[in-house]
Image (cartoon, coloured by chain):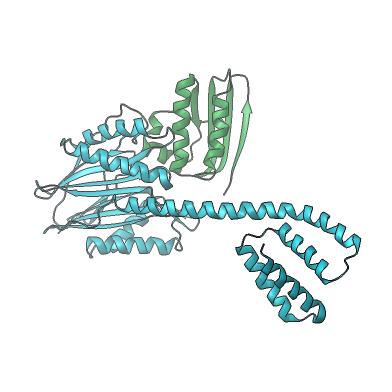
Chain colours: A green, B cyan
């Protein structure tokens, strides 16, 4: 399955909503979109919504680790919201759950 | 193009125009294949056809002039042909580099499993593609310890093979310093964190089994620990264990856990290629996996590992989307 992305922007916060599969094939596309938001001057918070993600593999988790490290460098807050249970499990097993800000979004 | 080919082509054309036979059409097809092998471009072929017509008789001026248009059009086909040929050659080179990496990777894992009087080891590790992202190792020590590593490296391909090589040699040098499993992972994490891409990470379970006391001491880094089967109770339990995957934070610390095996108890260590398995439209459930393991309990550790792999492969209709590794340790 493919990955689609929807980005909502205001001056200080970008919300990137991912839908579909985040894996080795689609991951680079997602990473590019999220990193563009991280590197946009003036953006203080980047939120990634995963409510519509059906599958994520370790490459997908790797993207969030890369983004988290990049956010630390530029001083931007990184928030992940609405994790489906299988994705939450991956976040917990790898330890990423304790490192990034997790929140439940408006859809929950 | 040689004069010989030109003469043959003129002859072929002459024969065909004289009788329009099937033989000449067949010869023309064979010639096309040969010209491709010789890397003759479409525009060169058109040029040849134009010259051949001149041999055969008076060519009207408008036919001669039309060849300039045809040649220009076919130049693009020629460019495409050359780019396909170049890609084919690069692909061959890539395949041969992958074969070297795959062979190197195979040399990083043990070729034979150790044999003990009262501990059986079973192992199945299968790569989804040419290079595996799963790494395992089994190292025996003179003091009776049996050290087991099971690990999953993000991504596959050359980067996974190179990372695997780093893990193996870093663990060998750290192992000599006789750290406990928690210390091993703490040191290894620093090596991995400094040396891999920011988007890469490694999950690992590392532990040492004391073959005298039948005690397995282990630590976990972002890896699903696996199961332990208690023969007396006839039940499977999830092994304890939690810790940050390697390569994420430079200062991660790890906890040591311990499992004691009685006669008939079984340890099952695995990678996510086993647990994150898609069966049709749903994912393999923990209880399902346990029931398949339960069905194989009467067999040896190796037969158990082999049968479980076959069972899961059958259920997923012979698709292996991710690397698969299962290590089984059974006290007999």
Q: Residue at x 90, y 61 (%)?
A: B61
Is residue B121 placed above or below B256 in the rendered structure?
Answer: below
Residue B110 shown left or right of residue B211 in the figure: right
* Quadrant of res B51: bottom right
Q: How many marks?
A: 0
Residue A76 screen position, x and y as percent: 50, 21
Using the image as rendered, state which of residue A9 and residue B193 is in the foreground: B193
Q: Residue at x 88, y 68 (%)?
A: B58
Is residue B189 placed above or below B70 in the rendered structure?
Answer: above
Residue A76 shown left or right of residue B100 in the figure: right
- Residue farthest right in this picture: B61
Residue B307 shown left or right of residue B58 in the figure: left
Quadrant including the C terminus of chain B:
bottom left
Is residue B164 placed above or below B330 in the rendered structure?
Answer: above
**Residue A101 in sight:** no
Residue B299 screen position, x and y as percent: 23, 65
Using the image as rendered, state which of residue B122 and residue B228 is in the foreground: B122
**Residue B109 in sight:** yes
Quadrant including the N terminus of chain B:
bottom right
Residue B136 screen position, x and y as percent: 29, 49
Q: Residue at x 43, y 47 (%)?
A: B157
């Amino acid at each position: 399955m493919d990955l689609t992305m929807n980005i909502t922007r205001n001056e200080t916060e970008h919300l990137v909503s991912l839908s579909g599969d985040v894996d080795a094939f689609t991951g680079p596309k997602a990473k590019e979109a999220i990193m563009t938001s991280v590197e946009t001057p003036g953006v203080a918070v980047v939120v990634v919504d995963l409510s519509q993600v059906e599958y994520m593999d370790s490459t997908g988790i790797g993207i969030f680790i890369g983004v988290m490290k990049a956010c630390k460098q530029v001083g931007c807050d990184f928030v992940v919201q609405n994790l489906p249970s299988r994705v939450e499990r991956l976040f917990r097993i790898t330890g990423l759950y304790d490192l990034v800000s997790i929140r439940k979004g408006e859809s929950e | 193009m040689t004069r010989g080919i030109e003469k043959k082509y003129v002859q072929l054309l002459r024969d065909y125009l004289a009788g329009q036979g099937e033989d000449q059409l067949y010869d023309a097809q064979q010639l096309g294949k040969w010209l491709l092998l010789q890397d003759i471009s479409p525009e060169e072929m058109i040029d040849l056809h134009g010259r051949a017509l001149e041999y055969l008789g008076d060519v009207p001026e408008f036919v001669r002039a039309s060849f300039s248009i045809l040649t220009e059009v076919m130049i693009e086909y020629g460019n495409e042909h050359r780019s396909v040929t170049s890609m084919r050659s690069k692909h061959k080179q890539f395949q041969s580099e992958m074969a070297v990496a795959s062979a190197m990777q195979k040399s990083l894992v043990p070729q034979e499993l150790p044999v003990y009087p009262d501990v059986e080891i079973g192992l199945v590790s299968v790569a989804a593609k040419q290079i595996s992202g799963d790494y395992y190792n089994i190292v025996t020590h003179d003091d009776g310890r049996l050290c087991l590593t099971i690990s999953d490296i993000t991504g596959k391909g050359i980067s996974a093979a190179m990372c695997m090589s780093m893990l193996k040699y870093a663990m060998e040098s750290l192992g000599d310093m006789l750290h406990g499993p928690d210390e091993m992972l703490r040191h290894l994490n620093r090596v991995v964190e400094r040396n891999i891409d920011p988007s890469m990470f490694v999950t690992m379970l590392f532990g040492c089994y004391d073959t005298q006391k039948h005690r397995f001491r282990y630590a976990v880094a972002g890896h699903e620990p696996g199961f332990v089967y208690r023969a007396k109770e006839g039940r499977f339990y999830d092994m304890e264990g939690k810790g940050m995957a390697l390569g994420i934070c430079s200062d991660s610390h790890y906890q040591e856990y311990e499992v004691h095996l009685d006669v008939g108890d079984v340890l099952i260590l695995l990678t996510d290629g086993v647990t994150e398995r898609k069966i049709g439209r749903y994912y393999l459930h923990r209880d399902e996996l346990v029931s398949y393991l339960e069905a194989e309990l009467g067999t040896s550790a190796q037969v158990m590992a082999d049968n479980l792999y076959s069972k899961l492969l059958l259920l997923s209709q012979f698709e292996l989307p991710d690397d698969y590794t299962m290590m089984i340790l059974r006290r007999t």
